[in-house]
Image: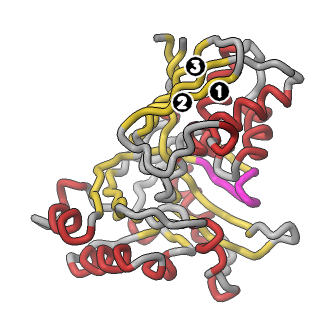
C-alpha cells in the first residue's frame, strides 16, 4: 500500500480574461499548495473500489465516478488501455469540500500519481496532466503541486519555483451551496474581465524569490462572494471590520486572509464560529516536494 499527499490548492491570483467558444471561461491564475491535506491510500484489489473516511465528509461523493478520485482512476485506466483495472482507493478527507480549495481535484491528482506507481505505468507528469484535465480543470495544477501558473480553462500549467513561505488563515462557512461553480460563474460579466496582468506579475514575483504581499493577490470572484449566502456576507463584514484583507478561495464560498492565524484580532475566530458558523483554519504554503509526498505504508 502507498499513501499519497493530496494538498489543498489556493488561487493566490485568479483572473478571467474572457469567455471561450466551448462555454468555459479563459483564466490566468497562480495556484499554490497548502498544508491542509487529504491522504489517499492505494492498494491492489481485483476491481476499482473506493472508501471515504475522515473529518470532512459533508458534500463528498462516497462512490462511483461522481467522486473525482474514482473518476481519475477510470480515466487513467482508459488512457493506458486497461480494460479491467483494479485498486482499492481509500480517502481520508481533511479538506472542507465545496469551499474552493480543490479537495476533489487534489484527490484525483493523488490517485493519478499513486496509481502511476502502483500500476508501474511510467507516465510523465505531462501525460498525467493531460489525463487529469479530462477529470477536472484544477487537476493538472494539483498533479504538479507547489506554485504553478495556470492558463486556459486550467489545462495549461507551468511549474513555478517554491514561493517564500506564507502563513494565511482560511475561513470555511458551515454551508453547502448547490451547483456552486455554475452559480458563481453565472455572476461573472465582461466588467470582471481583466488582461491577466496581476497574475503574470505575481508569477514573476515568485520566480524572483520575492516575498508576497496582499497587494499581489487578486480574485475575479471577490466582488461576488458576499452574494452567495447571508452567512458569507456577515462573516466577511465582521472580518473586514476587524481590518482583515479578504480574498475568495477559488470561486468560494470559502475565503482567506494573508494574515497568520495567531495575528488575528483577539476573539475574532471565536465570534465567527459562534455567530456565523465559520471556522478559521491556520494554514501555510507548502513546498512542491512536500505537496507531492508519497510513501509506502
- Mark 2 residue element: loop
Taking the image as shown, residue 262 lies to the left or right of residue 258, namely left
Nearer-the-camera pick, 23 or 284: 23
Location of mark 1 (residue): 113
Examine the structure image and report whether residue 141 is included in the region drawn in magenta.
no
- In the picture as drawn, the residue positioned furthest to the front comes out as 63
- Mark 3 residue element: strand
Q: Which residues are drawn in magenta?
A: 148-155
Taking the image as shown, residue 18 lies to the left or right of residue 81, namely left
| Looking at the image, residue 78 lies above or below residue 142 | above
| Front label number (2 vs 3) | 3
Question: Mark 1 or mark 2: which comes first in sequence?
Answer: 1
Residue contact at pointers 1 and 2, CB within 8 angstroms: yes
- Residue at 59% across, 28% down: 50
Question: Mark 2 or mark 3: which comes first in sequence?
Answer: 3
| Looking at the image, residue 119 lies above or below residue 102 | above
Residue contact at pointers 1 and 3, CB within 8 angstroms: no
Say which quarter of the image contains residue 172.
bottom left
What's the CA distance linking mark 1 and mark 2? Answer: 9 Å
| Looking at the image, residue 284 lies above or below residue 89 | below
Location of mark 3 (residue): 42
Amino acid at each position: 500500500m502507498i499513501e499519497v499527499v493530496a494538498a489543498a490548492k489556493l488561487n493566490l491570483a485568479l483572473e478571467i480574461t474572457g469567455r471561450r467558444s466551448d462555454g468555459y471561461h479563459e483564466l490566468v491564475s497562480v495556484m499554490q499548495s497548502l498544508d491542509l491535506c487529504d491522504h489517499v491510500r492505494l492498494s491492489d484489489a481485483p476491481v476499482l473500489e473506493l472508501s471515504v473516511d475522515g473529518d470532512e465528509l459533508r458534500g463528498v461523493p462516497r462512490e462511483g465516478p461522481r467522486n473525482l478520485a474514482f473518476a481519475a482512476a477510470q480515466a487513467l485506466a482508459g488512457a493506458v488501455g486497461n480494460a479491467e483495472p483494479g485498486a482499492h482507493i481509500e480517502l481520508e478527507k481533511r479538506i472542507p469540500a465545496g469551499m474552493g480549495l480543490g479537495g476533489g481535484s487534489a484527490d484525483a491528482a493523488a490517485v493519478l500519481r499513486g496509481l502511476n506507481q502502483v500500476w508501474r505505468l511510467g507516465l510523465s507528469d505531462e501525460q498525467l496532466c493531460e489525463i487529469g484535465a479530462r477529470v477536472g480543470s484544477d487537476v493538472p495544477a494539483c498533479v504538479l503541486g507547489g506554485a504553478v501558473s495556470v492558463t486556459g480553462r486550467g489545462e495549461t500549467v507551468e511549474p513555478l519555483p517554491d514561493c517564500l513561505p506564507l502563513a494565511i488563515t482560511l475561513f470555511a462557512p458551515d454551508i453547502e451551496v448547490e451547483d456552486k461553480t455554475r452559480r458563481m460563474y453565472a455572476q461573472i460579466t465582461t466588467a470582471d474581465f481583466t488582461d491577466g496582468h496581476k497574475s503574470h506579475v505575481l508569477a514573476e514575483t515568485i520566480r524572483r524569490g520575492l516575498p508576497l504581499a496582499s497587494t499581489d493577490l487578486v480574485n475575479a470572484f471577490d466582488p461576488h462572494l458576499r452574494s452567495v449566502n447571508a452567512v458569507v456576507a456577515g462573516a466577511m463584514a465582521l472580518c473586514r471590520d476587524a481590518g482583515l484583507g479578504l480574498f475568495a478561495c477559488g470561486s468560494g464560498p470559502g475565503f482567506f486572509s494573508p494574515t497568520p492565524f495567531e495575528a488575528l484580532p483577539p476573539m475574532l475566530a471565536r465570534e465567527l464560529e459562534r455567530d456565523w458558523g465559520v471556522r478559521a483554519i491556520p494554514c501555510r504554503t507548502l513546498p512542491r516536494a512536500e505537496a507531492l509526498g508519497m510513501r509506502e505504508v
